[in-house]
Image: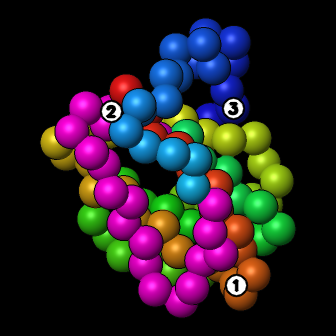
């Protein structure tokens, strides 16, 4: 989803977490959510990534696609969310931050 003004102002970074930037490897990434972590804002830089929300293992062809340099997305996390991410190809850079 594209962020509108309300979503941008309602995202509050988690005080115990820092902004993360990483080059994704070939393994699936499952971000850590600390106590009180209820949202994640993330963006793909340089190359696209894929993500799933229900525990399905994403691959280069399975999962929602987040195109490189697309606007960041915000997803609310609850007890049913099982977020997993993977690169579509080598060189994908992920940036994310956990929110309250």
Q: CA distance from mark 2 to mark 3?
A: 18 Å
Disc 1 crowd, CA 10 A, few/some/many (<14, 14-19, 20+): some
Callouts 1 and 3 close, C-beta under 8 Å? no
**Is 67 part of what is drawn in magenta?**
no
Mark 1 or mark 3: name the one nearer the start of the chain.
3
Looking at the rendered structure, which numbered label has been put on residue 89? Answer: 1
Q: Secondary structure at mark 2?
A: loop
The residue at the point 75 percent across, 81 percent down is 91
- Indicate which label's residue lies in the foreground, 1 or 2: 2
Looking at the rendered structure, which numbered label has been put on residue 62? Answer: none
Residue 65, position as x, y percentages in the image: 62, 61
Q: CA distance from mark 1 to mark 3?
A: 23 Å
Identify the residue under disc 2: 38
The residue at the point 62 percent across, 69 percent down is 22
Look at the image and give the residue range highlighted in magenta: 21-40
- Determine whether, in the image, residue 89 is placed left or right of residue 96: right
**Is the N terminus in the top left, top right, bottom left or bottom right quadrant?**
top right
Identify the residue under disc 3: 2
Mark 1 or mark 2: name the one nearer the start of the chain.
2
The residue at the point 56 percent across, 67 percent down is 50
Residue 84, position as x, y percentages in the image: 40, 65
């Amino acid at each position: 989803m594209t962020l509108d003004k309300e979503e941008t102002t309602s995202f509050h970074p988690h005080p115990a977490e820092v902004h993360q930037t990483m080059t994704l490897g070939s393994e699936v990434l499952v971000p850590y959510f600390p106590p009180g972590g209820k949202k994640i804002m993330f963006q793909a830089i340089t190359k696209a990534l894929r993500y799933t929300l229900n525990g399905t293992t994403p691959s280069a062809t399975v999962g929602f696609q987040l195109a490189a340099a697309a606007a960041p997305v915000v997803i609310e996390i609850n007890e049913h969310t099982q977020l997993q991410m993977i690169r579509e190809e080598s060189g994908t850079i992920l940036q994310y931050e956990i929110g309250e």
